[in-house]
Amino acid sequence: MKQFLHLRNNHVLGVISLILILGSVNVKVAEGRVHSELGQIEYPAINCRKHSASLKDFGGVGDGKTSNTKVFQSAISKLSQYASDGGATLIVPPGKWLTGPFNLTSHFTLFLQKDAVILASQNELEWPHLAVLPSYGRGRDAPGGRFSSLIFGTNLTDVVITGQNGTIDGQGSYWWDKFHKNQLTLTRPYMIEIMYSDQIQISDLTLVNSPTWFVHPIYSSNIIVKGLTILAPVDSPNTDGINPDSCTNTRIEDCYIVSGDDCISAKSGWDEYGIKFGRPTQHLVIRRVTCISPDSAMVALGSEMSGGIEDVRVEDLTAINTESAVRIKTAVGRGGFVKNIFVRGLNLNTMKYVFWMTGSYGQHPDSHYDPKALPTITGINFKDVVAKNVTYSAKLEGISNDPFTGICISNVTIEVSALKKKKLQWNCTDVAGVTNNVTPPPCALLPQKDKTDCAFPNDKLPIEAVQFKTCSL
Ligand SMILES: *[C@@H]1O[C@H](CO)[C@@H](O)[C@H](O)[C@H]1NC(C)=O
Ligand SMILES: *[C@@H]1O[C@H](CO)[C@@H](O)[C@H](O)[C@H]1NC(C)=O
Ligand SMILES: *[C@@H]1O[C@H](CO)[C@@H](O)[C@H](O)[C@H]1NC(C)=O
Ligand SMILES: *[C@@H]1O[C@H](CO)[C@@H](O)[C@H](O)[C@H]1NC(C)=O
Ligand SMILES: *[C@@H]1O[C@H](CO)[C@@H](O)[C@H](O)[C@H]1NC(C)=O
Ligand SMILES: *[C@@H]1O[C@H](CO)[C@@H](O)[C@H](O)[C@H]1NC(C)=O
């Protein structure tokens, strides 16, 4: 870090310290490029920033013990003044930076250098409480409010969280223990949550041990999540990797996820609250992701899907020792829809179910859900799937009087595990659709139809066209 600051004006740093002591908001920040003796750092981002400063400039201590909560908060609050002047980057240098939650600002980049580790505080007093999400009506762990996520942003435009594969460690064991002991009175914090925002990039980081979900963009649009390594013990509770929730235009790519819950889960609110809020997750691309999650799905659609999920394109995914591949989870009372889902190119090894749809997921926020609110599940397309060491090829369970329709499955080769070979490979109820070139042979509800090629869209979504600029520090 010494080298990094070396070429800056030490006098300026002195002034910054003095100003910080005096509590003025008038911090001077390096303009333009800061060169280090290590050379210039270049990184891809949706937008570059004119100003940059290091956490150290604001008095941060990276010893893993000193709390930097106030340092992060005041640094970002001060850098927010550059939003209308080219934006600012806050650099987190190598070291262990213990902190409670902090809020992001617009036209802002949080950059974690190589060997930078942000450590989430395990002191609950550091965690502000937030109101429940309107599309959920209550918290997932407890009826009341919820803890703020570690990194939170709301009503923002143009935010980048990136780095040289620096680490954010949620130190989740504290929260997992409380969850297991039934001691939570508020819902556990997410690691990163961005709400009501537009133009978000989260990339090139290692995220470990989130208290619950890792990355949760909600009520937002134009989101790119790329190059994340996400790691949690496979038995940790609800450590979903990436959960786009009531979001439009999201691109998730090149991630490696090991977790205790779904690696990726598209959502859009819960029962009557989600129906009323009525905001779908749509135009979602997921590609080149590897998942390990023995008790959960590689990609889940739901179970909270009451605002609807549509136009999801899943391509070139690998799962190893994962319970299921692309799973639909819903229930009577959810309402909403899951439609126009396109999946191609799955490479699966060791899996309980290759195809899994569940219409009886249950789990309601309260007893006020509408039993007449039936979900519409239609237009679900899969092609080019290779699976090995599988227990069941498919469990497709629709809802009686509300069948899941328009299911199309083509060009699929499933190698069933010889050791535990189950007789009923395709267990289908209340579903309708067609198949072609699928082994083992599907159920009677999904008859073979020659020449069927479950089409994947040819057009590209606008979020796929977004290009990164090369930025430098
Ligand atoms: C972040 O913003 C939310 C509301 O916008 C607020 O409730 C919360 O206290 C803020 N968190 C911090 C750490 O300042
Ligand atoms: C954030 O945006 C939402 C939706 O537009 C709005 O309801 C809310 O009042 C805004 N919050 C703030 C703090 O501006
Ligand atoms: C990032 O760090 C993780 C954890 O150390 C490692 O497994 C991964 O390969 C790294 N990724 C890159 C692109 O360097
Ligand atoms: C069938 O799927 C395999 C594996 O994804 C792929 O290599 C092959 O090209 C596909 N065949 C056709 C006819 O599309
Ligand atoms: C096959 O799957 C079983 C679990 O069903 C697992 O124990 C075994 O290691 C897997 N074998 C291979 C070769 O991956
Ligand atoms: C097939 O699925 C139905 C509906 O989920 C279930 O009730 C039944 O037990 C399953 N049959 C077998 C043999 O697993």
Image (cartoon, rainbow, N blue to C red):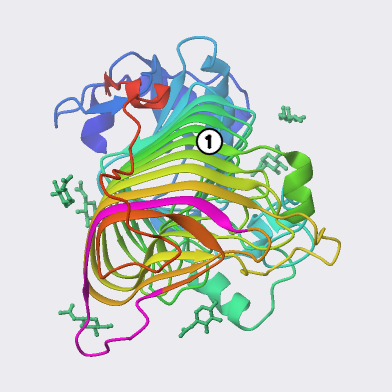
Q: Say what amino acid the circle numbered 1 marks.
A: Gln
The front one of 31 and 45 is 45
Q: Secondary structure at mark 1?
A: strand
Left or right for 382, reference 361: left
Vertical placement of residue 312 versus 35, above or below = below
Vertical placement of residue 95 versus 5, above or below = below
Left or right for 314, reference 359: left
The front one of 138 and 272 is 272
Give the quarter the ligand 2 occupies: top right
Give the residue at mark 1: 282
Judge whether residue 268 can be spotted in this image: no
Rendered residue at 40%/26% (across/down): 463
Residue 212 percent coordinates (x, y): 53, 62
Vertical placement of residue 140 versus 280, above or below = below
Rendered residue at 50%/57% (across/down): 432
Left or right for 254, reference 209: left
- Residue 423 in the magenta stretch? The answer is yes
Q: Quadrant of the N terminus?
A: top left
- Residue 136 in the magenta stretch? The answer is no
Please give the range of residues in magenta. Answer: 403-426
